[in-house]
Image: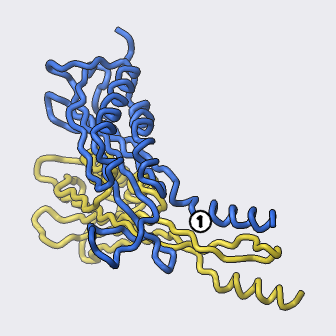
Amino acid sequence: MRAIALWCLTIVALSSASLVADDYIVLLDDDVDFSTLRTFTVRDVNVTSQHPALGSPILKNQLRDAALAALTERGLRAASNQPALIVDCSLRGVNFTVDRTGRPVEQRNTRGDRRRKPRDFTEGTLVIDVTRADTRELVWRGVYHDSEPDPSKVAAAIPAHAAKLLSRFPKQKKP
Amino acid sequence: MIPRLLALVGVLLGLTAVILADESSVQADPTTDFSVLRTFSFRAQQVQSRREELDNPLFLKKLAAAIRRGLIAKGLTEARDRPDLLVDFTITGEDFGDAERRLVRGIRGGPVAIRQPIRIAEGTLVIDVFKRDDSAPIWRGVYRDDERTGSKLTYKLPQDAMQLIAKYPKARR
């Protein structure tokens, strides 16, 4: 009995291993001298998801706070008047179904469709863009993909993902 | 024992692992003397992808830098004014789902195949080199790269571009 339980656990763990994997990347402009850009403002938090946990205004505020805290920790100063950098965050949630052949298939917007299959996992994509206020050029971008069977788990982890991405932002030296 | 072994061999033969193989090809106009074409400039740079890590100017800049390094290593010089060659490049990104079959130990100790859903990020890079006044390219390099994650694809594509440019004919000094 114990062997069967262990075996079932192994199968479940292996089959869901690829769905719960995180993936992130940070891109920055190597030609920009980040040490001269010391102030920032978090402008926009844009969410595209049908799930109430991902589209929640509370999550938007948490994301904004996480970005503020992470950039302050990197030595930058929040400024509402003439900031050097503008930070925009966007969050997208996409649901996937695993079909009979085992392949994940993106669910289209089929609300009310009786043939719609239940969701197997949700991929949340967080994008943080940092733009120079004077030239309007993108100088830094962080992208974080998180796939979980439960979209609420994706939502709960988003502020931590934002902090992780922004911990890679070039650190300011103390003047 | 023998039926068990046969079953194991059957399962192994039946398994088709997902192969994430890269593909590349290079075509060059045989009538063109590449050795006399010594200067180049970038023209069109395009990304067609839903992936945010690919569809942004920072990634395009990294890719252009890799191509530039490769061409300079071939003896060419970047020139803004009346270059001999114009370089265009396009990235087309696509995501698709697949299932990977894996063998796990069954309850009775024998192998059992399970299907594991995976996602694949595919990027196709096309580099075209034109003579300044021509509409048809004299050189084309195509690289298709499949990776398990978007971050790997983003890291790999500039290296792929370098590999393609390494096959470009050398310019005469």
Residue under numbered circle 1 = A15
Please determine whether, in this image, residue B128 is positioned above or below residue A21.
Answer: below
Chain letter behind tag 1: A
Report x, y in % for residue B51. 32, 56
Instruction: Identify the residue at image location x=12%, y=69%.
Output: B134
Please determine whether, in this image, residue A37 is positioned above or below residue A9.
Answer: above
Report x, y in % for residue B89. 25, 60
Residue A20 in sight from this viewpoint: yes
The hue in which chain B appears in the rendered picture of the protein: yellow
Mark 1 Cα within 10 Å, few/some/many (few <14, many 20+)?
A: some
| Quadrant of the drawing holding the C terminus of chain A | top left
Q: Is B47 placed left or right of B70 in the picture? A: left
Element marked by disc 1: helix
Q: Nearer the viewer, residue A96 or B48?
A: A96
Q: Nearer the viewer, residue B156 or A119?
A: A119
Report x, y in % for residue B150. 41, 55
| Quadrant of the drawing holding the N terminus of chain A | bottom right
Please determine whether, in this image, residue A19 is positioned above or below residue A114.
Answer: above
> Label 1 sits on what residue type?
Ser
Instruction: Identify the residue at image location x=26%, y=22%.
Output: A37
Q: How many marks?
A: 1
The hue in which chain A appears in the rendered picture of the protein: blue
Report x, y in % for residue A5. 74, 64
Location of residue B157 (image quadrant): bottom left
Instruction: Identify the residue at image location x=50%, y=80%.
Output: A101
Residue B77 in sight from this viewpoint: no
Instruction: Identify the residue at image location x=32%, y=74%.
Output: B27
